[in-house]
Amino acid sequence: MHKVNVMKLVLLLMFNSVFYSSANAGSTDRPAESAHVPFMGSLTDLPPTIQNYPLERLSERVYVVIGPHDWPNKKTKGFMNNPAAILTDDGFVIVDPGSSADVGRGFLEKLKCVSAKPVVAVFNTHLHGDHFLGNQGIRDAYPGVPIYAHQRTIERLQAGEAQEWFERFNGMTEGALANTRIALPDRALKGGEVMKMGGVTLKIHHPRHAHSDTDIMIEVVEDKLMFMGDISMNKFMPYSAMPQDASFKGTADALKAAIDNAAIEVYVPGHGNPENKTSMAIQIRFTEDLLASIKKYYSQGMQAHEMTALVEKDLQAYRNWDHFDELGKVISHAYVEVEQDNF
Ligand SMILES: [Zn+2]
């Protein structure tokens, strides 16, 4: 066998045991573990799919794969969120199984390394495609598994947004969802529920309107941990994907309420590394700074498109966040909220 092929084979055999770091994944501030692999050179040839990202244990019962920050593309096959699982006495409760059936399946494979227990429930934190399109990957393996989401998530997905998300992701990935069917959540939540699953207590929080009007945050009481969905994104420009769905003030209020919950020590964002109260507070400050800057130029009579460069300048402290270059799109929607507040 050619020497290069031998090296590739060794590399492939190893990749499940090493952290994957590529130019795409580097933005998550995670250590470039390729440094721990002598002579192997760059691992950037490995595709940035879920298979090449490690499953990490965050607390006694909670496991997560921290995904890349890229918008869906052919290389990632759409993988971009943080699929997670809670290991209960009865089996796994999965939170946001990802953006395609293949991502869901890839996540299940990783969980098998932790426990042979089945999946007993799935939760979708909100209606965006990177959080629910992976449901089918779980349903195929566990046909009767209940999938929980806020009732508004179910209403909106059923009304046509599920298909829109499917087409959007399939288009952006050039067909990575060809084998994905839509598996909608089928158990509606209102917020305020306290659910016991396999000895674990889950409290469901629903801020009326934050990242969207469909969000739930899931508190894992015994582990002092909260799944934030996309209300929280760590070093990832919030609102950049779907600013039209968001309430900017509502998101800041939801973050505040989560921080004020004294029972919580670890926060799992929808995108980016796990957080504590300090990093969550930085996200509140971003939204406050954004709205203050827009308000300043609004009161000078400027339109959204006229203030973009000025607001960008005011927010330079956040310029290293992924997708900062999409601030213009965010400003045009935040401007509408500022305008409404002034009438
Ligand atoms: Zn998301």
Image: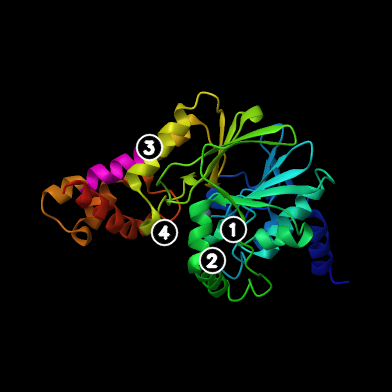
Q: Which residue is mark 2?
A: 162
Q: What residue does disc 1 label? A: 132
Q: Pick whichever, 324 or 231, lies toward us.
A: 231
Q: Nearer the viewer, mark 1 or mark 4?
A: 1
Q: Amino acid at mark 1?
A: Phe
Q: Secondary structure at mark 2?
A: helix
Seen in the image, is 89 located left or right of residue 266? right
Give the residue at x 26% y 51%.
337
Q: CA distance from mark 4 to mark 2?
A: 15 Å
Residue type, mark 2 in image = Ala
Separation (CA) of disc 2 from disc 3: 28 Å
**Whole-number angstrom distance, CA of label 1 to CA of label 3:** 25 Å
Q: Residue 282 falls in which quadrant of the image?
A: top left
Q: Earlier in the sequence, mark 4 or mark 3?
A: 4
Task: Of the two numbered discs 1 and 3 on the same chain, state the one appearing first in sequence.
Answer: 1
| Amino acid type assigned to the residue bearing label 4 in the image | Met
Label located before the other in sequence (4 or 2): 2
Q: Earlier in the sequence, mark 2 or mark 3?
A: 2
The image shows residue 219 at horizontal and vertical percentages of 58, 35
The reply to whether discs 2 and 1 touch (Cβ–Cβ < 8 Å) is: yes
Q: Is residue 287 magenta?
A: yes
Name the side, left or right, on which 187 lies relative to 314: right
Quadrant hosting residue 132: bottom right
Q: Nearer the viewer, residue 210 or 62?
A: 210
Q: Circle 3: is it few (<14), some (14-19), or many (20+) Cα within 10 Å?
A: some
Which of marks 4 and 1 precedes in the sequence? Answer: 1
Q: Residue furthest top?
A: 262
